[in-house]
Amino acid sequence: MFEKILGKSKKFFSSQQTSILSAAFVIMVMVIFSRILGLVRQRVLAHFFNVNELSLFFAAFRLPDTLFEVLIFGSFSSAFVPVFARLAKKNIIKAWGLASSVMNVGLIVFFVLVLGFLFLASRFYSIFAPGFTTEDQEKIVYLSRFLFLAQGIFVASYVLTGVLESLKRFLIPALAPVFYNLGIILGTIVFYSRFHLLAPVLGVIVGAVLHFLIQYPLAHNLGFRFSFRVNEKESLKKVAKLAFPRIIEVSFLQVSKVAELFFSSLISSASYAYYTFANTLQLLPVGLIGLSISKAALPSFSEKADSRKEFADLFWKTFNEMVFLILPISASLFVLRIPLVRLVYGTDIFDWEATVQTGLVLSAFAVSITFQAVNSLMSRAFYALHDTRTPVLVSVFSLIVVVVLDFVFIRVLGLPIWGLAAAFSLASFLQFLLLFFLINREFGGGFLFVNFYLLFKKSVAVLLSSFLMFFMLKFFDRSVWVKELSFLGKTSIAEKISFESFVLDTRYTFNLLVLTILVFLVGFLSYIAFSLILGNREIYSFYRLIKSRLLLQFDRLKRVEIKEESVNIPPDQ
């Protein structure tokens, strides 16, 4: 019995996801767990450390993250996965040789560069984090030296992630970030009393090790073997050629992130923590829907690359399904920004000022969440066509816009920290417009106005539901009535109403949670209703998907019942 259960468990974790939606569903479920744990991680950090200390911790990531993302992370989605996936279809042995070679080269290049960066860390932070004191800069440098080790582990781990995703095994790679976040949470709690701010850094190292270990057994069972030799040099050159434009793009992305650190440090020592906390919240739907569907779509896009019509049909179908899913979540984050920040980060040392500042940053991010998600999908469509140049050029342009707007908003206009998020959102919108036009041209035209019309209908539905959410949030919040912030509080009708009989005192966490859930549910249901009225077709696609899944589960249960009954029938005498 135990062996049977174990066998089913192994099959569940190692099975392929054959369609984009099924793969995306698997990734989404695991991303939910990972992102929830990410929020728990941030909550734990907000519980143990004040915002000034957390700014030092987040700033320490900047240099190790820059090196890792430029050399490793950026190249996998655009170069390694498409090349490995195509090679695996022809010769899986050569594909494994390519994976091992990529890991070798990645580790060698990473650690050689780390040695140089370790000596430059002090100078780097003195130039790009000028708002911090000299003492704080020394603390940041000290923490960053440990974080380099964790990023080195990730170099090897992301090779395994690329391999498994290429073979359409999405569950384990999606599960790996869950263990990474667990490592940080446990490291912070266990080591805090002894190591203080070094505790979450040690947790990062533990999490990186877990990220690797959870993926290695499946990769090994599928055939991956590490070798110190560098094989498949032709395929390796192809990966490098495809990765080069993406590396340029990620380099500019890191420049924009360094600019965020630079300008936020000039505003206040706590500003970078506000920005990072808000960014964590807005990345939840971007990762949950945008990244999940984009990752799931890339192998299928690569398979359809030889048939442009099938490719176009698949892309636009996926595009509209993604927009339909993410728009209401984006609107909910905008409307519910303050309640969400209070619920997630509201600790004794994360005060009301921190809540308001983080909420303002989140609202500025929220308007671009949909653009960020579909930009990742459109970029991967170009990657599947082995065109990394086009999305890279567009991305580089948008990143230059981000840095210019950062300077204008913060140094010229003197905006607070939310100005950095507004700059990012505006640049994301410009990137969306360019990619949308170029992908339409890539498919021979004819899709531009049709899909703009579909986007318009979805936007109308989400705007109507947003107004309804905003009204409910104000109407049922006791503080709004007490302070007469609501327009209802000034009407003659409102004077006759005993508001205490129906409003919620949101000073208490439970009441705030109830109001937030209620408003979100009303917004979601109204979005569905308005979508039906406006004739958004995607709602029927998801209805059929859910219906088919439920029928499949019902059919499986019936088969099990029939099998059990047949076992209990006595044999003929």
Image (spheres, rainbow, N blue to C red):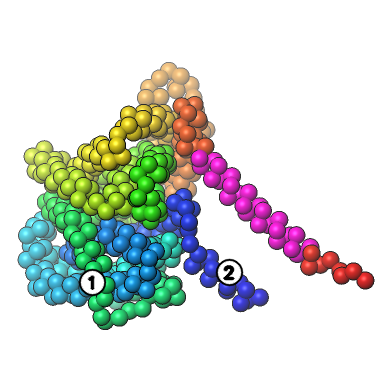
Task: State the CA–CA distance, disc 1 to disc 2.
Answer: 39 Å
**Could you tell me which residue is drawn at 47 percent across and 37 percent down?**
538
Residue 99 lies, with reference to residue 36, above or below; the image says below
Looking at the rendered image, the quarter that the N terminus falls into is bottom right
The spot of residue 390 in percent (x, y) is: 21, 47
Q: Which residues are magenta?
A: 541-565
Whether 376 is among the magenta residues is: no
First in residue order: circle 1 vs circle 2: 2
Residue 362, labelled with which disc? none
Which residue: 24% across, 63% down?
239
Res. 231 in view: yes
Mark 2 burial class by Cα count in 10 Å: few <14, some 14-19, many 20+: few
User: Is residue 515 visible in this depiction of the protein?
Assistant: no
Three-letter code, disc 2: Lys
- Where is mark 2, residue-wise? 8
Residue 459 place in picture, x, y as percent = 37, 31
Q: Quadrant of the C terminus?
A: bottom right
Residue 233: image tag: 1
49 vs 466, left or right, is left
Q: Name the dominant secondary structure of the magenta segment.
A: helix
Residue 556 is inside the magenta segment: yes
Secondary-structure class at tag 1: helix
Question: Does dot 2 land on a helix, a strand or a loop?
Answer: helix
69, 249: nearer the viewer: 249
Residue shown at 31%/67% (left/top)?
158
